[in-house]
Image (cartoon, rainbow, N blue to C red):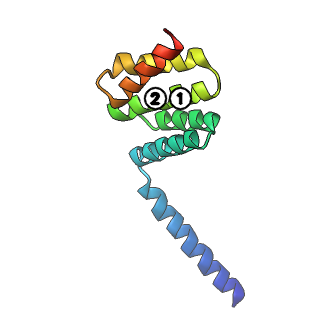
């Protein structure tokens, strides 16, 4: 009886995993990776931030707003790691490609301090 019960529990768990796997779309996976990148940065885990950003980009094209935010997060993470040339490059890409983005203004401020 216990074996049969364990089998049913396993069967339900496996079915649930298959159903939930179908619910994860590339765009939701991207948003999740961006959210984890923001969270990692806020908790001082800059290297993890860069990893989450790389995963977000692997899921396909980001929206312009997501791409702008990703450049901002990349610049911030690179600064935390003391990789100033990489931070400057991320901020410059943000300002050049998305000058109207909210984060572009923040990036300009950082550029004025890092690369006067």
Q: Secondary structure at mark 2?
A: helix
Say whether residue 105 is left or right of residue 41: left
Q: Residues within 10 Å of mark 1 (few under 14, many from 20)?
A: many
Give me the residue at 55% from left, 42% from top. 42
Residue 51 x %, y %? 59, 35
Residue located farthest toward the right when viewing the structure as drawn: 2
In the foreground, 107 or 30: 107
State the residue lying farthest toward the bottom: 1
- In depth, the one of 81 and 65 nearer the eye is 81
Q: Which residue is mark 1?
A: 76
Work out whether residue 102 or residue 22 is closer to the camera in this orientation and state it. Answer: 102
* 22, above or below 111, in the image: below
Q: Depth check: 14 or 91 in front?
A: 91
Is 30 drawn above or below residue 11 in the view shown? above
Please give the residue where the numbered disc 2 appears in the rendered image: 72
Judge whether 38 appears above or below 77 on screen: below
Q: Position of residue 108 (x, y in %)?
A: 41, 19
What is the secondary structure assignment of the residue under circle 1? helix
Residue beneath the point at 64% across and 85% down: 5
Q: Are marks 1 and 2 in contact (CB under 8 Å)?
A: yes
- Residue at image location 53% in from the left, 29% down from the top: 76
Q: Residue furthest top?
A: 116
Name the image quarter holding residue 12. Answer: bottom right
- Image point 62% across, 74% down: which residue? 10
Q: With 110 as the anchor, is 104 left or right in this view?
A: left
Separation of disc 1 and disc 2 at Cα? 6 Å
The dot on residue 55 is: none
Q: Position of residue 43 (x, y in %)?
A: 60, 44
Q: Position of residue 114 (x, y in %)?
A: 53, 15
């Amino acid at each position: 009886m216990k074996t049969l019960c364990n089998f049913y529990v396993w069967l339900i768990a496996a079915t649930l995993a298959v159903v939930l796997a179908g619910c994860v779309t590339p765009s939701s996976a991207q948003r999740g990776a961006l959210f984890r990148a923001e969270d990692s940065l806020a908790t001082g885990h800059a290297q993890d931030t860069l990893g989450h950003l790389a995963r977000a980009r692997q899921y396909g094209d980001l929206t312009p707003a997501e791409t702008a935010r990703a450049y901002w997060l990349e610049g911030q993470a690179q600064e935390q790691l003391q990789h100033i040339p990489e931070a400057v490059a991320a901020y410059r890409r943000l300002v050049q490609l998305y000058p109207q983005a909210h984060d572009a203004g923040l990036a300009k401020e950082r550029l004025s301090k890092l690369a006067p």
